[in-house]
Image (spheres, grey):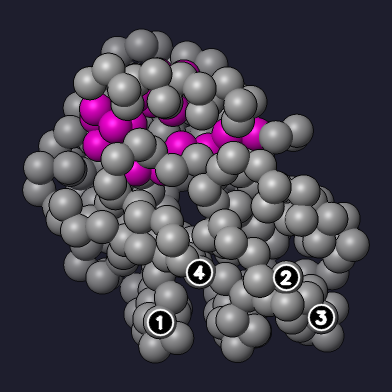
Amino acid sequence: MKICKVKNITIGEGMPKVCVPVINRNHQDIIAELMRLEKLDIDLIELRIDYFADLLNDQELISLFNEIASLSLTKGIILTYRSEKEGGNGQLSIQEYIELYKLAVSSNAFDIYDVELSSGTNAIITLTSLIHQAGKKVLMSMHDFKRTPSIDTMMEKFKLMDSSEADIFKIAVMPEDYKEVLALMETSLRAKEIYDRPIVTISMSNMGLATRLLGEQFGSAITFGKADNGSAPGQIDVDSLKQVLKIIHENI
């Protein structure tokens, strides 16, 4: 597998990398939370910028991004704007979404940018080019908080992510039963065999817990946990998560 390296973190090799989301709404709380998470035994931090109260204020965004850059965090930092249609709070137009990421890229505060596959071809081309020209990584994502699509449909999504030149592919879905959890894990195995880039697959809710723990065996390179409040159903405490991942890693 082709790995994805950010700072001193190698995504796609060894244990799944543990990522914790930041969902605070104001500038100072975001900075305080980033500094707190920097001290934890995790690998990545995801800033969910769609929670930010001043999302339409460019000066506030620039101030926030510049302060994040000044922290010189050692964790890999993912910037994620999650649209409402994909389970987030974001209501920006596509052009506003692009402008948001332009400000972020200019600040050099982030290592990885989540780009939604549903953004459309033109936006994907623009954002991917912008991010890659800055020497940063694209995590292309697809979320379905209502159901688990068929294996063929999920594989088609991975194919689209591959053709879009994403560095990391992510699919997160909601299961109705354990058969659908197994379907996601089979999708992970298939994708791992076909593609040479890190795959991230998540079956949400407590029913999908296994997908957050067994990534090293089934091909999922990042798992999301919580230090306090999570950003999606089924996220578990990072200390417990890390402990289980280590036990699995040492015994396979």
Real-space Cα distance between discs 2 and 3?
13 Å
Residue 183: give x, y in percent of width and height. 25, 24
Disc 1: CA contacts within 10 A as few (<14), some (14-19) or many (>=20): few
Camera-side mark, 2 or 3: 2
Q: Is residue 160 left or right of residue 203?
A: left
Q: Which residue is mark 4?
A: 111
Q: Earlier in the sequence, mark 2 or mark 1?
A: 2
Label 4 SS:
loop
Give yes or no for contact between labels 2 and 4 (Cβ–Cβ under 8 Å). Answer: no
User: In the picture shown, does residue 248 fall above or below 140?
Assistant: above
State which tag comes first along the sequence, 2 or 4: 2
Look at the image and give the residue range highlighted in magenta. Answer: 209-226
What residue does disc 2 label? 71
Q: Where residue 89 sits in the image (x, y, percent)?
A: 70, 52
Question: Which residue is painted at 39% across and 88% down in the image?
Answer: 133
Q: Position of residue 236 (x, y in %)?
A: 60, 24
Spatial CA span between label 3 and label 4: 18 Å
- The disc placed on residue 135 is 1
Q: Earlier in the sequence, mark 1 or mark 3?
A: 3
The numbered mark, 2 or 3, whose residue comes first in the sequence reads 3
Q: Residues within 10 Å of mark 3 (few under 14, many from 20)?
A: few
Residue occupying the point 24% across, 29% down? 218
Q: Quadrant of residue 182?
A: top left
Give the residue type at disc 2: Leu
C-alpha gap between disc 1 and disc 3: 22 Å
Specify which label sits upstream in the sequence, 3 or 4.
3
Image depth: mark 2 or mark 4 in front: 2
Mark 3 lies on residue: 63
Q: Is residue 185 above or below residue 93?
A: above
Report x, y in % for residue 19. 54, 44
